[in-house]
Image (spheres, rainbow, N blue to C red):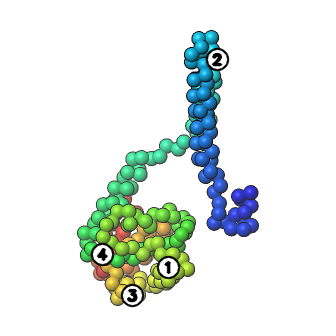
Amino acid sequence: LGTMFAYLVSDMIRSYNRVSIVICYVSILAAALVADRLYKKYKRNAKDRVKLYAACGVFVLLAGVSIWDSYDQWPVPDYEGIKAEYDSDRNFVARIEDSVDAGAMIYQLPYHSYPEGGIDHDMMDHDPYIGYIHSDTLRWTYAAVRGREGGEWSYNISRLSPQNMVNTLKSQGFAGIYIDRRAYDEKDRQQLEAELQAAVGSAPIESENGNQSFFKF
């Protein structure tokens, strides 16, 4: 029903499966209450302890089967890789903060529609939030809402040539351009950065893992 509603009416109301967390909690709570009731009922009578142990055994067996059945649904994150990427992002944004004045405005490329812009090559939907996560004093163009004045302005800027983009952003008080390289194929990325480097007259700051670059004006 949820899928049909999304296709025929609106996909803004979806993911009904998320209620499974609530169902899971209620089910665990119900099992715990039953186990508690059985324990209180049989604990005082020695003859009924066999029933108590049997009930506990069934409860443990069901719990074990449930855990075993869901084990393959527990992905193991690449903690070391996540940490390395987080550290690289943090250090990169810190270098940007050190290179510009507090309160500086940073224009972000590529323009990424918000909300729910989707995946862009290897850039995930919310990767443009990296600047917000790691900076305390900078201002960023993501996430201007599409269809509104800020979103339309940011999109129009992204359509300019690199030289015109730099000139326009400079005139409006921006301090530089942040690029998430994962959103480009290699050829387009190299061409864009070569033209931006020629426009600003200096090489970019690069992140340790090579995912981002920053061109200061």
| Towards the viewer: 130 or 195 | 130
- Image location of residue 188, percent across then percent down: 47, 73
| Badge 2 element | helix
The CA span between labels 3 and 1 is 16 Å
Give the residue displayed 62% in from the left and 30% down from the top: 34
Q: Earlier in the sequence, mark 1 or mark 2?
A: 2
Q: Earlier in the sequence, mark 4 or mark 1?
A: 4
| Towards the viewer: 105 or 95 | 105
The CA span between labels 3 and 2 is 80 Å
Give the number of the mark in front: 3 or 2.
2
Which circle marks residue 51 in the picture? 2
- Image location of residue 215, percent across then percent down: 33, 75
Q: In the rendered structure, which amino acid carries the disc numbered 1?
A: Gly
The CA span between labels 1 and 2 is 66 Å
| Badge 3 element | helix
Q: In the rendered structure, which amino acid carries the disc numbered 3?
A: Thr
Residue 85 sits in quarter: bottom left
Q: Residues within 10 Å of mark 1 (few under 14, many from 20)?
A: some
Question: Which residue bears the numbered disc 3?
Answer: 168
Question: Which residue bears the numbered disc 1?
Answer: 151
| Badge 1 element | helix
